[in-house]
């Protein structure tokens, strides 16, 4: 039997799409392999949001060139944000690649599969996510299936933040109909899924392009009524688009978890304007205060870019003060990376030296480590609900509703169970405790 290996980097959307591709290859009779060298077909699901990610992709493509020289029958498929509209140019650069297809362009993949003689089961085409695949992510190979599924609900992005390449690679926003998403989640729940995370580059735009303009709050209401679905999450929110209706829905629907990804990107109004984010620091602060009033248990994650063109020391300090004030649970910090074709790449000079970017990045991370350590310490001695996702280093692990990673030791079988865990140990990154029986 032929074997496939999927290599994935980048965002949750890429992970979800790798699961869909794995579902398709399973239905075509392929078996998952655990490494490039043991596979007959390799899929690279790529990210080029920053140069560092792109370098990893190019390095892996180089490695595969060597492997293909040794095994000329190896088939190499490339998808994700590396694939732009000029696929001819990519074909010239990477002649050892058999198929390049844009993110989510399954008709292209299936057409290629037909030409290779792959049979396709209709059901899996309609519910491509029906088999959540641990093997879909290179780091997870060999693990038992998780009780959590990622569900793309809106593709693309219409925002064109000045630094971001995503709209150029993933195209304009296209929402999936409510009924289709509900059917898919019902099917997944029948197969043992307990938690779904609804995905979009900007989930707050969900539905604006559908006939009756349903929104994310409406979708959350529909999904909440599915018996045996325990938890619902969604990401990523945009501070300019998140609605009061959504915040109310999140606060009132029991299955919707108390966790929000709300990227601020900068703590300075001039930089936010140059980034074309569409809100000010004052508006962001108001929003967070409102959310915390409505949902006091909420845990907040954010993204910050340091070293955007022209960012002065003072403008960076505004970011540090905002971090101090907001007390986020998690921050993903990135150094600005110019992306060819974007507005900032065309109009601004990448004039902040690498060492300064690194220094700023370290300062935010240091401050955030101290804050997260204090926030997590408050959970010591408390009992939390953990949905158990698997085992690592001899311990069970899973997440709280507020998305905190929790480890515990026990001889029982906890995979997919909701465990009550008493927290005994905390760190800025995870919690440890004892399971209550
Ligand atoms: N849609 C989300 C939003 O509105 O923030 C985020 C999606 S973006 C693909 C993921 C993260 O990558 C962003 O939040 C940003 O912090 C980071 N990012 C995007 N472009 C970047 C760039 N050119 N340089 C550095 N970081 C970047
Ligand atoms: Fe990129 Fe902005 Fe769209 Fe997020 S909202 S994907 S940062 S353009």
Image (cartoon, grey):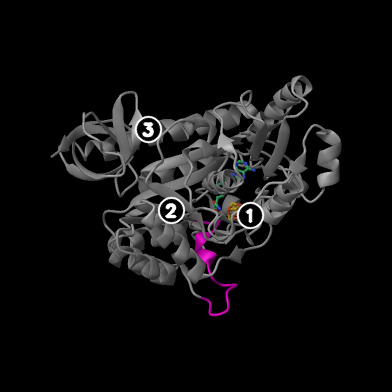
Q: Residue 161's mark? A: 1
Q: Nearer the viewer, residue 219 or 362?
A: 219
The residue segment tinted magenta is 199-213
In terms of depth relative to the viewer, which is nearer, 276 or 392?
Answer: 392
Determine whether the beta carbon of the residue marked 1 sits less than 8 angstroms from the nearest atom of ligand 2: yes
Q: Give the Cα distance between marks 2 and 3.
A: 26 Å
**Quarter-of-image position of residue 33:** top right
Q: Relative to 70, does residue 409 appear above or below in the rendering?
A: below
One can see residue 159 in this view:
yes
Residue identified by numbered label 2: 197
Numbered disc 2: secondary structure: strand
Quadrant of ligand 2: it is: bottom right
Left or right: 296 in relation to 382: right
The extreme left residue here reads 437
Is ligand 1 within 8 Å of the beta carbon of the residue shown at mark 2?
Answer: no
Give the crowd class for mark 2: few <14, some 14-19, many >=20 residues within 10 Å.
Answer: many
Determine the residue positioned at 36% across, 51% down. Answer: 192
Asked whether the viewer can see residue 244, the reply is no
Earlier along the polypeptide chain: callout 1 or callout 3?
Answer: 1
Label 1: element kind? loop
């Amino acid at each position: 039997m032929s074997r496939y290996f999927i290599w994935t980097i980048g965002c949750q959307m890429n992970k979800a799409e790798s699961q869909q591709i794995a579902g398709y290859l399973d239905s075509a009779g392929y078996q998952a392999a655990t490494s490039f060298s043991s596979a007959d077909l390799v899929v690279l699901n790529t990210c080029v949001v920053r140069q560092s990610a792109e370098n990893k992709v190019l390095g892996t493509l180089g490695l595969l060139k060597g492997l293909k020289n040794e095994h000329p029958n190896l088939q190499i498929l490339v998808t994700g944000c590396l694939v732009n509209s000029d696929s001819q140019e990519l074909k010239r650069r990477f002649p050892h690649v058999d198929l390049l297809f844009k993110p989510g362009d399954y008709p292209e993949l299936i057409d290629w599969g037909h030409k290779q003689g792959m049979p396709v089961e209709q059901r899996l085409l309609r519910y491509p996510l029906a088999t959540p695949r641990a093997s879909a992510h290179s780091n997870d190979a060999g693990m038992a299936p998780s009780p959590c599924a990622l569900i793309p609900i809106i593709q693309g992005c219409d925002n064109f933040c000045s630094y971001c390449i995503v709209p150029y690679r993933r195209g304009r926003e296209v929402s999936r109909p409510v009924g289709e998403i509900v059917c898919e989640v019902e099917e997944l729940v029948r197969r043992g899924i307990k938690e779904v995370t609804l995905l979009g580059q900007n989930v707050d735009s969900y539905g604006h392009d559908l006939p009756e303009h349903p929104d994310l709050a409406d979708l959350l209401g529909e999904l909440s009524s599915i018996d045996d679905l325990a938890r619902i999450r969604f990401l990523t929110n945009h501070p300019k688009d998140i609605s009061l209706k959504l915040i109310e829905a999140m606060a009132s629907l029991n299955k919707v978890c108390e966790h929000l990804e709300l990227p601020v990107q900068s703590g300075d109004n001039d930089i936010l304007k140059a980034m074309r984010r569409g809100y000010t620091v004052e508006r962001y602060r108001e929003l967070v205060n409102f959310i915390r009033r409505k949902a006091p248990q909420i845990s907040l994650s954010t993204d910050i870019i340091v070293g955007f063109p022209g960012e002065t020391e003072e403008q960076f300090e505004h970011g540090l003060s905002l971090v101090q004030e907001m007390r986020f649970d998690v921050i993903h910090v990135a150094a600005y990376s110019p992306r060819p074709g974007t507005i900032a790449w065309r109009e601004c000079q990448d004039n902040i030296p690498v060492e300064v970017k690194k220094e700023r990045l370290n300062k935010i991370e240091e401050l955030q480590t101290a804050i997260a350590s204090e926030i997590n310490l408050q959970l010591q001695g408390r009992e939390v609900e953990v949905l158990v996702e698997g085992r690592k280093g001899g311990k069970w692990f899973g997440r709280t509703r507020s998305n905190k990673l929790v480890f515990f030791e026990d001889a029982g079988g906890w995979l997919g169970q909701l465990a009550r865990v008493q927290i005994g140990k905390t760190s800025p990154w995870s919690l440890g405790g004892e399971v209550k029986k």
